[in-house]
Image (cartoon, rainbow, N blue to C red):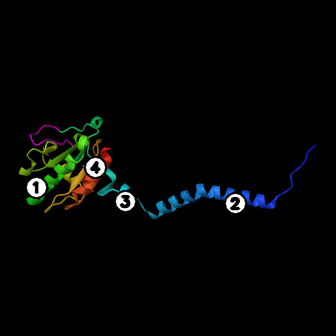
Amino acid sequence: MNQTLPFDPVRRRRNRIMLVLLVLCFVLPLMVAVALQQSGWRPEHTANRGTLLQPPVALADLALRHADGSEYRYAPQEARWQIAVVPPADCGAACGELIDSLAKVWQLQGRRADRLQVLWFGTVPEQADGFRALLPMQVDPALNARLPGLATSGAPSAYLIDPRAFLVMHYAPGFDPGDLRADVAKLLK
């Protein structure tokens, strides 16, 4: 014998409510995420502190030279990032302060510090003595032509170069070295 259970409208309503709540548990967070993304909101800890260059500027075709004239070679296999600084001629005390700040940024990377170099294109201030990650470089007009927002007087700006020789970030003159440190720390992890 085949008996059918009696229809219970209360139970059916309760089951439908549970199904709707279950679907909302999965769909609602997705809808909130899409709305936040469309509005342009980004969490503070994921935002870059420097200006991201879109598109990145390729530098691999440039023949960069150390201050002694030897060729500088990018080594993508070493996953080494570079901070490039092209100081203006009248830099003075601002360059000394920047060297001190860059040395602290480098030291604060801890065990990852060896994956970071500072390329200094121009006359190196005296404060750089003992800063082993600083590489004095020859001024290169072709490089200067590709650098957006290059400072011509006052405080120098800095640029972040990825291991594959692409200029990816710019830090305007007078930037906070803590911003550079935060970005570099994220990239070296």
Residue identified by numbered label 2: 17
Residue hosting label 1: 96
What is the x, y in percent for residue 78? 27, 36
Real-space CA distance between mark 1 and mark 3, rounded to the nearest whole angstrom? 31 Å
Disc 3 and disc 4 in contact, CB within 8 angstroms: no
Q: Which residues are magenta?
A: 60-71
Q: CA distance from mark 1 to mark 2?
A: 68 Å
| Residue 28, x across and y down, in percent | 57, 59
Q: Nearer the viewer, mark 3 or mark 2?
A: 2
Asked if residue 124 can be seen in this view, the reply is no
**Mark 2 neighbour density, 10 Å: few (under 14) some (14–19) many (20 or more):** few
Q: Earlier in the sequence, mark 1 or mark 3?
A: 3
Mark 1 is surrounded, within 10 Å at the Cα level, by few (under 14), some (14 to 19) or many (20 or more) other residues, namely some
Q: Name which of mark 3 and mark 2 comes first in the sequence.
A: 2
Tell me, yes or no, whether the highlighted magenta stretch contains residue 166: no
Residue occupying the far right of the picture? 1
Q: Which residue is mark 3?
A: 44
- Cα distance in 3D space between marks 4 and 2: 50 Å
Q: Amino acid at mark 4?
A: Val
Secondary structure of the residue carrying numbered label 2: helix
Kind of residue at badge 2: Ile
In the picture of the structure, the residue carrying the numbered disc 4 is: 184
Label 4's element?
A: helix
Q: Tell me the amino acid under the disc marked 3.
A: Glu
| Residue 38 visible here | yes
Amino acid type, label 1: Gly
